Image: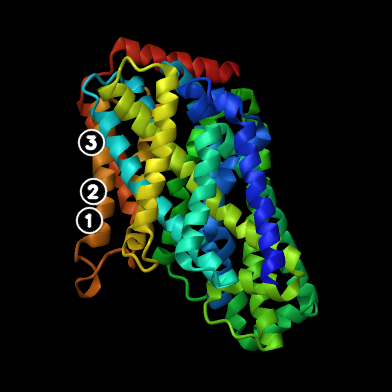
Amino acid sequence: METAALISIGIYFLAMLAIGLFSYRTANQDLAGYVLGGRKLGPAVTALSAGASDMSGWLMMGLPGALYASGLSQAWIAIGLFAGAFANYRLVAPRLRVHTEVADDAVTIPDFFEKRFKDRSRLLRVISSLVIVVFFTLYTSSGLVAGGKLFDSAFGIPYAWGLWVTAGVVVAYTFVGGFMAVSLTDFVQGCIMFLALILVPIVALSQSGGVGEATATLNALNPELLNLFSGATVLGVISALAWGLGYFGQPHIIVRFMALRSVRDVPTTTAIGMSWMGVSLIGALATGLAGLVYATKNGLSVTDPETIFIILSDVLFHPLISGFLLAAILAAIMSTISSQLLVSSSSLTEDFYGTFLRRSASQKELVLVGRLCVAVVALVAGFMAIDPESTILGLVSNAWAGFGAAFGPIILLSLMWRRLTRNGALLGMIAGAATVLVWIYAPLGPDGGSLSPVLYEIVPGFLACLIVAVVVSLIDRKPSEMVLADFDRAQELRRAG
């Protein structure tokens, strides 16, 4: 089994490297080509790239595992994410595509913040860049841990070897092909994930007697397994749905909108992206429930619910197909790692090196520095991930809330409210991030613990950022005529399509 599955994994790795080589020409032209692909992405690549880089291993392992362990009541996060992704396409995608181009062709989120508000102090750029580099290095280490554990659990390959193989392939195609390689590999990886999440639950259900038999088995185990509201509380449902708020502030997702070739492509991109996400989420939910039915009827021992996808891939399919399905998990992991590496690299290159160290650097020099930063961030993340039980992973679990609270309201306001000021954006960003950290780490909860179990930290963090940004902007001086003129121009271009 292991040899045949490894052959499938090897073919997958070679395909990713080939895409990196194919994208070399676009990535080698200038920094905009390396970090944004020259703003030439079509709707299908944009949609699947955003989806694949968003979901990571959570879609293939975390969500099915949650359904396996607790039933349909765990679906609220998926519902919140679906709603948040749709709002992101509708509210952010068309506006960010136009506003970043009007803002002197901004190529990173910190670059956009500085140019949108004409911030001569550069505080907005520095603070937002630090947040991106720190959190994404931690995020990347989490993905590498997942890759190492997959090789260890599925093939018996030592954890460290699996970690560095995963890192090596991702760095290779990102290093060579830049944003275009990351986006094209994400497209392929999104297709693999999509097919896997359709195939596995359908085969598992068919082998368990069909939908009717599966429903009867689940009801016999526990009638509450199919109850969406089982054990639900108002705050619990709000916390789960609030995951959707995070989309507005995730740099590795919204940067795809900046690279879209035209604002006219947004409706098609939305249709493709939401269709992919809807089917994939339903497939992940079905995998968890179908896996529980199959394990129950066949007496399978599942010690870790999050491995149910791996177990079903192993017992239901030929080893070559199993390898393909395991490649789907790798695809989910690697698509997110590559996006995070590139966003971190572009921030280090554009927002630090090109802004403070070498303002006169040529485009070729910036591209070279960008490639080196990809390797450096990956190495740092790799060494952080050497210990699979690293406490860093506890921090990474809160990064979604950190980005969503610090950047989300500022992105929305900067694209939709002309009165937002530089001070409002800066203080709102700080308030959002600080609230999340206090909510997680301050001993203010029950029995002196965290407040996170009471309410997901993105809710108070998002509200704090939004309120501070609006209040400070209203108290502050009006933005300059130049800032207002750029905002109005971007709005006109977006309406004109």
Q: Tell me where residue 474 appears, x and y as whole percent.
A: 25, 28
- Residue type at tag 1: Val
- Whether residue 165 sits left or right of residue 369 in the image: it is right
Q: Secondary structure at mark 1?
A: helix
How far separated are the C-alphas under marks 3 and 2? 10 Å
Q: Badge 3 local density, few (<14 within 10 Å), some, or many (20+)?
A: some
Tally of numbered discs:
3
Q: Tell me where residue 116 appears, x and y as whole percent.
A: 36, 21
- Residue type at tag 2: Ala
Residue 442 seen from this side: yes
| Foreground pick, 21 / 65 | 21
Q: Tell me where residue 370 appears, x and y as whole percent.
A: 42, 31
How far separated are the C-alphas under marks 1 and 2? 6 Å
Residue 91 seen from this side: no
Which residue was labeled with disc 3?
Answer: 427
In contact (CB < 8 Å): disc 1 and disc 2: yes
- Residue type at tag 3: Leu
Residue at point 21% right, 20% down?
Answer: 477
Image quarter where the C terminus lies is top right
Q: Secondary structure at mark 3?
A: helix
Which residue was labeled with disc 2?
Answer: 434
- Above or below for 65 versus 334: below
How far separated are the C-alphas under marks 1 and 3? 16 Å
Residue at point 56% right, 36% down?
Answer: 90
Q: Secondary structure at mark 2?
A: helix
Which residue was labeled with disc 1?
Answer: 438
| Foreground pick, 414 / 378 | 378
Q: Badge 2 local density, few (<14 within 10 Å), some, or many (20+)?
A: some
Q: Badge 1 local density, few (<14 within 10 Å), some, or many (20+)?
A: some
